[in-house]
Amino acid sequence: MPPKKRHSGPTQSKGVKPSAESASPDKKESPELSLKKHRDKDAEFVALCKSLHVTDSVCDRAWTLWKTVQESMDEVADSQKRLWGACLFVTVTDMDVACFTLTQVLKAVNLNVKQFMALVRKLDVNLDTISTKVNSALTRLEKKYDVTLAIYERFEKSCKKIFALVAEGKERETMRSCWTMFLLAKGRVLQMEDDLVISFQLLLCTLELFIKRCSPDLLQPLYKSSISKVQSPPTRTSRRNQSKAKSRPPEPEMDVQLLETLCKENECNTEEVKNVYQTSFSAFLDSLDLSRSPDFPQVNDLDQQYEEHYLKSRDIDGRLFFDGDETVLVPKVEISQGERTPKKNLPDEDAVLIPPQTPIRAAMTSIQQLRGDLISSGDQPSTNLDTYFKNCTVDPTQDVLKRLETLEQAFSQRFGQAVGPRCVVLGKQRFTLGVRLYYKVMEEMLKSEEKRLSVQNFSKLLNDSTFHTSLLACALEVVMATYGESSFKAGGYNHGGGGGGGVGVDPVETDVCFPWILDVFKLSAFDFYKVIESFIKAEPTLSKDIIKHLETCENLIMERIAWRTGSPLFELLKQEHEGGAAEQVETPASFSQPLQHNHTAADLYLSPVRPGHRVLPPDSPATASSQASSQVLTQPAQTPRQPKSNSLSLFYKKLYRLAYTRLKILCSYLLPSHPELEPIIWTLFQHTLQHEYELIRDRHLDQLMMSAMYAICKVKSVDLRFKTIVTAYKNMPNTNQETFKHVLISEGHYDSIIVFYNQVFMQKLKTNILQYASTRPPTLSPIPQMPRSPYKFPNSPLRVPGSNNVYISPLKSPRMSPGIMTPRSRMLVSIGESFGLSSRFQKINQMVNSSDRSFKRTLDLGSAPKPLKRLRFDVDGQDEADGSKSGGESTLIQKLAEMSSTRSRMQEQKMKEDAEARKE
């Protein structure tokens, strides 16, 4: 973190006055810009640099970046000054220097947050302008902005219900102080300031403090009556009279009755907010000497302290939300989802039935559902689960309890390190919910196994430490995803490091996104993957979003995480290949067979076992007891081999299907006129995964996919350049630019995917690749059958036959009111509850019979992206594996247009498949 400011007076955010020491990490370099050194640059650019107090080295580097960007763009659509600001932001982030805040550069170039983020990303014309470090900083800033915006919108709505309008606008002064204190509390308490749930709970704590301390004439009746009678709100006289203030009994730290009212009005769990208050907010008040004071905090003091925090974080000045400043306003085309929903043409009495869905309401509803589903689950094993434990040859109860105690300590401590030092107790709270879910799912799994195998002794499984740790990790991943703390919606998964939030902030662990939990529990990704499918099947109350989250975790494991050095996957592969040709990881002939989704966690964790049990065909599902839950391959008159691993076989089946699905998408983008190449590329790709799996060690599945595509196109004389491949790859779902910018070449050395192809992939597979150009090419690998996902969504709406716009879905829980159900457009009917006037039935009939499609919400995807003039991976402009120059700009334009068209067709096809799945 940069050093504290040395001047004592308050600094206004509009002025840029960083200290000399914080201006640059290089103390030998003068923080003042030398105008003489920059006479070769545009005078307006130098003036912008001077206004933002950048150093000479930053000015030079940003100007070099600007010249690169200028040469690469067909035309400069935005003003030069705005692009200069983006170049300066990229430069200071890459150099880790503390010159200016994000708000300061936004004001200098007259852009709002979203516009500036889009502009910075547009600089990446050569796919090497924006480093992964800059991209990570952008993602973090964007997520923090979205969270702060969502909370401010709720703050405004809440204040209208809390504060009464009075003369001279005194309520606005109170609201401003409250918002500033919340921002300061969030900055002091949380390292992970993009945590929506804890941030919102801190806001409720701050509101509680201001409500109980403000004058009664400022409050609406509901909150005036909610303040506990034990204390009376301090009047202006009592605040001025020091002797009376001292004689009054100490103010309680928390008004429980008032907090309960706030929580009820905001659909928030009261116990959780109490925990935040007692563990974090009280400590924050103590740091300001406010915990026992009856007075309001001084506005100037709050402003000064928040100013210091904001300048240190070097990101967005949160006070500007309250001011309605243009730099933080939401662009009109990005109005919140609730406002984008079509308005109902219903009578006024019905208009309030369906509140708009907001990020906070969605989070609170998800948490409410999770906690409700676990009400009946205790913190200890149930009677049924305890019976299963006691039926074991070796009772696992004590080991289970000791393991939970150890893992709770590890989890809560690491949670506190990532989220905030005062959040260890909140980590324990998350862990408690996770334990309840862990016991609940384990019991359901055992019931299912008992029914399937007709046995009650699961001693081997229940004494397997890896099984228990994996099951608990999965339960905790569900809990954290529900709380929004492990989410893939804001820029992918945790690559193992933190990543500061502001411009050049020092990296700290502020990310608990998957696979963070694996690192905390020292659990291999391959072992974790074994439990995912069984977990989903055993817990039918999981929401569709959570199921998709776990499916994404599974895909990430297969794409990259399971291939890290030290993974047990490599030892299993070694054993399989040493077993001889009959022990292939997956029989190619089985690709066209359906993927059997009846493997259970018991099958996978107890596999393989010693040979000597009943032999099963190579592709039969393992349905034997837990003592024979593996497939054993034996042949007459041969030395018995080790049995084939169920876990490895299923892993490779899923891996092949994932790999082929991604390849098919990329081929549809790039090779629609060469459909004959897809099976050839797949054959090389599949061969690499099966026989040259060392190539994927510490790398990504998609790196092999893109390399295989380029190789086959090369030998088949199809003009497809790497720059075109990676441009299309960026448009695929769930991709990250690091995949093609940061590829392992040799130990500790990383470079672009082109260098990987030249120095690693081509060298290893050259002989095999050239065979595809011969008159006797290798036999094509069968295409894997593409089954529907095993993760069914039982609560998904089903379309009424014969209608295009009427759906029905089961009422998942009696706790859910129509207000928190979907759809949020037109009309919602909950059978069994009061329906209203008969005229509403007529409206339903009109909707069913109507062919008018005006009800449908449409998403304007806009025109196709403007094709890039040139894409470069290295400094000399040679971007192809053979060193040739780029020359096919018209081809690239055509490819990008085809990509846009194909993507639209794919989206339409996906909608059709989803509709068919709902029918089934």
Image: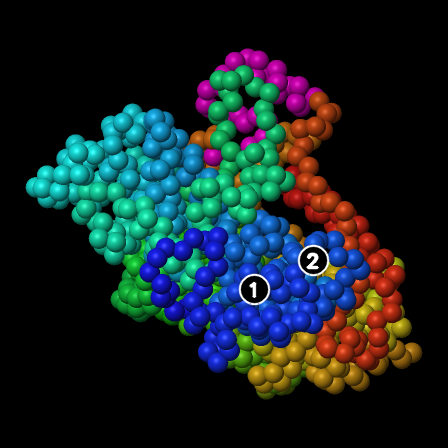
Is residue 212 left or right of 812 when viewed as pictured? left
Q: Residue at x 46, y 41 (%)?
A: 323
Front label number (2 vs 1): 1
* Viewer-side residue, 752 vs 868: 868
Q: Is residue 41 above or below residue 539?
A: below
Instruction: Residue type at mark 1: give it.
Output: Lys
Q: Decide whether residue 411 is among the magenta residues.
A: no
State whether the magenta stretch is mostly helix, strand or loop.
loop
Question: In what element is the residue under mark 2?
Answer: helix
Is residue 368 left or right of 578 when viewed as pictured? left
Q: Decide whether residue 839 is among the magenta residues.
A: yes
Residue under label 2, please give it. 80
Query: Over which residues does the magenta segment extend?
Result: 820-849
**Quadrant, the C terminus:** top right
- Mark toward the start of the polypeptide (2 vs 1): 1
- Choose top left, top right, bottom left or bottom right for residue 577: bottom right
Measuring from the top left, give residue 407's x and y in whole percent.
33, 66
Q: Residue at x 35, y 60 (%)?
A: 420
Instruction: Residue type at mark 2: give it.
Output: Gln
Q: Residues within 10 Å of mark 1 (few under 14, many from 20)?
A: some
Q: Residue at x 58, y 85 (%)?
A: 747
- Residue 50 numbered tag: 1
Measuring from the top left, give residue 856's x and y in whole percent.
67, 32
- Choose top left, top right, bottom left or bottom right for residue 217: top left
Q: Residues within 10 Å of mark 2 (few under 14, many from 20)?
A: some
Question: In what element is the residue under mark 1?
Answer: helix
* Viewer-side residue, 300 vs 709: 300
Specify the farthest residue to the top: 838
